[in-house]
Image (cartoon, rainbow, N blue to C red):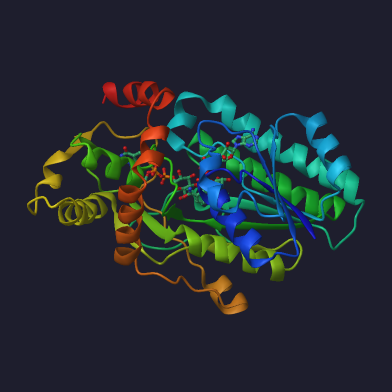
Amino acid sequence: MKIIITGGAGFIGSHVVRRFVNTYPQYQIINLDKLTYAGNLANLKDIEDRPNYTFVKGDITDGPFIETLFEREQPDAVIHLAAESHVDRSISNPLDFVLTNVVGTVNLLNAARSHWKGEGSKRFYHVSTDEVYGALGETGMFTEETKYDPHSPYSASKAGSDHFVRAYHDTYGLNTVISNCSNNYGSHHFPEKLIPLAIHNIKNNKPVPVYGKGENIRDWLWVEDHARAIDIIFHQAKAGDTYNIGGHNEWKNIDLINLLCSIMDRKLGRAEGESAKLITFVKDRAGHDLRYAIDSTKLQQELGWVPSLQFEEGLEKTVDWYLTNEDWLENVTSGAYQDYYKKQYSYR
Ligand code: NAD
Ligand code: DAU
């Protein structure tokens, strides 16, 4: 089987590519990635020489290029992760999100439709987010039946892409599957997102920006558990189906940051409470969703997936990875990152 994995040089994509290359030596894995600021081939150093792995640099917004790639490679499946993924960037630049997340997805769907000609065995797996469901109050959880109610340009663009994927199943009979996952954490996470940004700033004795009062709640999942869920769903789901993936692991942002600060104190040999002094409450994110919580009962009961790692253990492993991979962190935080950081945080 030949699988195109899009966005394989990004955070989650690199874990998915690594898992498929290592677990299925009989599959050919093509990593299709534009290498935006978030794409980094250093994420895949350990598997780049494997005979069942190929990297193709390309942009999913370029329809003719995608057609040519399908013609040349004749893939049997697509696992689609390429996206603009950061909510704050979507607030300052929504159009990039429409182009990559909506138009890019439709380009891939069109190529799959025209090249696979209704062959039911060929699967289009779309990786999506819990943010399409909107925001929860103090109680309740998102299930696969929850109505879409996106609030940010990012989640609106992911919701749009999900709708297109379902439409291609219902209209053209494409063998599609969608999963909607909660917040991932782990190694190779770009430091624009809360956890790696906080690790980087604590390490460098810089303010740790917490939006609003830090009361927003996210459900955190170890990225390798997400990659394993994708593997299981890819191989076992029925055509047209949807699965929610989550950690049953809700944390208020401020509690998470305090936990991270105490781990960092220990790892850096600082006095307890030292890193927490860096916590700085800053202007809230516009349209900030209060709470996400995923009910992954369907995935657990039908396909037997359960998260493997306790959050404290996963967070500790994550901190260890960043502290032993200083070069990776220094490389991605030089250059354009500095401009982004100044723009994003100076006004707050
Ligand atoms: P990321 O930003 O780390 O990586 C995105 C990758 O896509 C990068 O390698 C980038 O170069 C590539 N890319 C971007 N635009 C492209 C284009 N036009 N053509 C080709 N490649 C392009 O993102 P991530 O956090 O790894 O998220 C991956 C997917 O999982 C996304 O679809 C995202 O919506 C979804 N998701 C993420 C999370 C999370 O917590 N990070 C949770 C649920 C779902
Ligand atoms: O829920 C899944 C989603 O999780 C994915 O679809 C997105 O691609 C991914 O980026 C993530 O979105 P969030 O907006 O939840 O993640 P982020 O790390 O940006 O923020 C997590 C929480 O922390 C959120 O409530 C905003 C807050 N935050 C974030 C940053 C970057 C801060 O308080 N300070 C910060 O500096």
Image quadrant where one finds the C terminus: top left
Residue 120: horizontal and vertical position, in percent? 86, 61
Which residue occupies the extreme right position in the image?
117
Decide: is 122 above or below 328: below
| Viewer-nearest residue: 330 or 208 | 330
Q: Where is residue 79 in the image (x, y as percent from the top left)?
A: 68, 52
Front position in the image: 285 or 327 = 327
Give above or below for 124 relative to 345. Answer: below
Left or right, 327 with respect to 68, comes to left
Q: Which residue is drawn at 55% across and 36% down?
A: 84
On the picture, is 79 further left or further right than 9? right
* Ligand 1 location (quadrant): top right
In this rendering, does residue 268 appear at all? yes
Q: Can residue 144 be seen in this view?
A: no
User: How many numbered marks have been drawn onto this rendered protein structure?
Assistant: 0
Picture quadrant of residue 91: top left
Residue lying at 44% horizontally and 54% vertically, measured from the top left = 184
Q: Residue 333: give x, y in percent of width and height.
A: 38, 32
Dividing the image into 4 quarters, which one contains the N terminus?
A: bottom right
The structure residue drawn at horizontal position 49% and vertical position 74%, both measured from the top left corner, is 306
Q: Is residue 103 rendered to the left or right of residue 250?
A: right
Seen in the picture, residue 11 relative to 335 is either above or below; the reply is: below
Q: Where is residue 62 in the image (x, y as percent from the top left)?
A: 74, 29
Q: Residue at x 70, y 68 (%)?
A: 235
Q: Which of the two residues, 304 or 273, is positioned nearer the viewer here? A: 273
